[in-house]
Amino acid sequence: MLEKLTKWKSSLSSQEGPKIEDVNVPRHIAIIMDGNGRWAKRKGLPRIAGHREGMKVINKVVRKADELGVEILTLYAFSTENWKRPKTEVDYLMKLPERFLNKELPMLMEKNVKVRLMGSIENLPEHTKRAVSKAVKDTEKNTGLILNFALNYGSRFELMEAVKKIANQIENGSLSAEEINESVLKENLMTAELRDPDLLIRTSGEIRLSNFMLWQVAYSEFWFTDVLWPDFDEQHLVEAIAVYQKRARRYGGV
Ligand code: FPP
């Protein structure tokens, strides 16, 4: 524990670029990893080359988040709307979790990272499902950073499903309509046991949420950058945290 604390403190003071405080590091960071296609296009490469590079960035971001003491890192890897893309691109995107985990599972184990998923996992191809389920199982006893992959995830779908679950509980008599409150809704979301994101990052210059964690980001700080996801690195993460730390969060108070 002491060793981890010393490593963390020295990592904060050895930062190049913006300095961040060793208190008030966002406990949950959610990232919309955008701009892979444009990155590839600018380089005259096929879109999938952008996704391949984008996958490599995850290693850097996980390591840095872990080092800084972030507790939860949620990554938007595939949305319910992404099925509209050309089949070859979807097929490629569906291979990425497998590739990533084949390569990075030893690192995740070494760093004590616990992999978690949110989204409609049942509707993924068998090979993708197998790979992600294995990663969840292999890391289930880890107690460090929670790496939460949003895979086949859409916030409206999530909210719809939560409403259905609550309706079922009312139908079977285990809940009454009067008992519905924010906690009941939260418990029925795909993030039931997770705190809400403190900081939301979106890359590539787009300023929108794209159906991502609409309920959960109600009080999150947002940080947008023009950097395309494949160019995102540890220093950008530190920059986002530095901006977060300068903002005062009032949660509607004064
Ligand atoms: C958005 O860029 C990116 C995605 C839809 C996919 C993100 C996936 C990864 C970064 C890799 C996932 C890896 C794992 C391990 C799950 P875009 O294609 O919309 O870019 P564009 O807006 O420039 O076209």
Image (cartoon, rainbow, N blue to C red):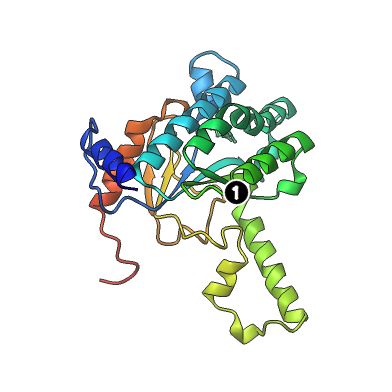
Task: Identify the residue shown where x is 26% and y is 42%.
Answer: 6
User: How many numbered badges does the structure rendering display?
Assistant: 1
- Judged from the image, the quadrant occupied by ligand 1 is top right
Residue furthest to the front in view is: 2
Task: Identify the residue shown where x is 77% and y is 80%.
Answer: 171
Horizontal and vertical percent position of residue 116: 59, 48
Nearer to the camera, 150 or 10: 10
Q: Is residue 52 above or below residue 222?
A: above
Callout 1, which amino acid? Glu
Question: What residue is shown with label 1?
Answer: 140
Residue furthest to the top in view is: 44
**Quadrant in which residue 20 is drawn:** top left
Task: Identify the residue shown where x is 53% and y is 19%.
Answer: 41
Image check: 27 left or right of 172?
left
Q: Is residue 231 visible?
A: yes
Horizontal and vertical percent position of residue 154: 62, 51
Q: Is residue 79 visible?
A: no
Image check: 210 left or right of 95?
left
Nearer to the camera, 37 or 17: 17
